[in-house]
Amino acid sequence: MFNQQRKSYIEIGNVYFFTATINNWFNLLAEDSYKQVIIDSLTYLNDSNKMSIFGFVIMPNHIHLILQTHQMNGKETVQGAFLKYTAHAFKKMLALNSPTFLEKFSVIADNKKYEFWQRDSLAFQLTKKETAIQKLNYIHNNPVSKKWHLSETPESYHYSSAEFYKSNVANFSFLSHLMDVF
């Protein structure tokens, strides 16, 4: 029997470009309080030595990360734990602040009532320095693209690692430099 590997497969110790998208492309992450859930989770996973983050951007309806996992989170993958934790936090926040919007994430399933992240996020292993730099630049330029235009320059968009690489300003304690692994 053919066993196809998931798009979200991440092998411990390797570096990946990872993209997770909010279900139905809703702009759930447009508000800073929802972005902070992502930041808090990345900080926790880094501080507990489960994951290193070398680049990131939080867009209104998706995130891009360059990451490396170091160990499982109990019985689940680190990226699975990240998606699960953030989904629970989003559910609590929406139940309190926007129950109508919460219902847009409602699903018919045996194991859950809501689904915030699209299934099977994309994970692309980075094996070459050139490709890693290309993906990092892509991440940093996402907020200034014509489609989004969230800031004038990559480094002026707060929810990104661009300023870390441009000015060596460490606004986020979880960031490590990509050249430390390439």
Image (cartoon, grey):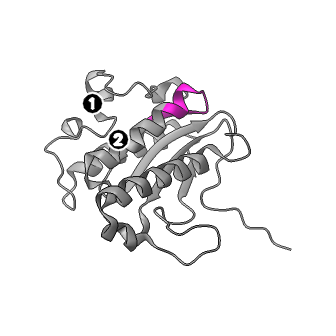
The x and y percentages for residue 136 are: 39, 41
Disc 2 from disc 1: Cα separation: 17 Å
Residue at 46%, 73% in the rendered image: 106
The label on residue 72 is none
Residue 108: tell me if it is visible.
yes
Residue at 53%, 52% in the rendered image: 83
Task: Report the quarter where the N terminus lies.
Answer: bottom right
In the rendered image, the vertical position of residue 1 relative to residue 19, given as above or below? below
In which quadrant of the rendered view does residue 39 lie?
Answer: top left
Report helix, strand or loop for mark 1.
helix
In which quadrant of the rendered view does residue 74 lie?
Answer: top right
Q: Which residues are magenta?
A: 44-54
Q: Nearer the viewer, residue 49 or 89?
A: 89
Residue 147 within the magenta-colored segment of the rendering: no
The x and y percentages for residue 13 are: 66, 35
Left or right: where does residue 91 sit relative to residue 152? Answer: right
Q: Which residue is mark 2?
A: 36
- Callout 2, which amino acid? Gln
In the rendered image, the vertical position of residue 175 relative to residue 55, given as above or below? above
Residue at 65%, 54% in the rendered image: 9
- Callout 1, which amino acid? Glu
Q: Earlier in the sequence, mark 2 or mark 1?
A: 2
Residue 52: tell me if it is visible.
no
Q: Which residue is mark 1?
A: 163
Left or right: where does residue 77 sit relative to residue 22? Answer: right
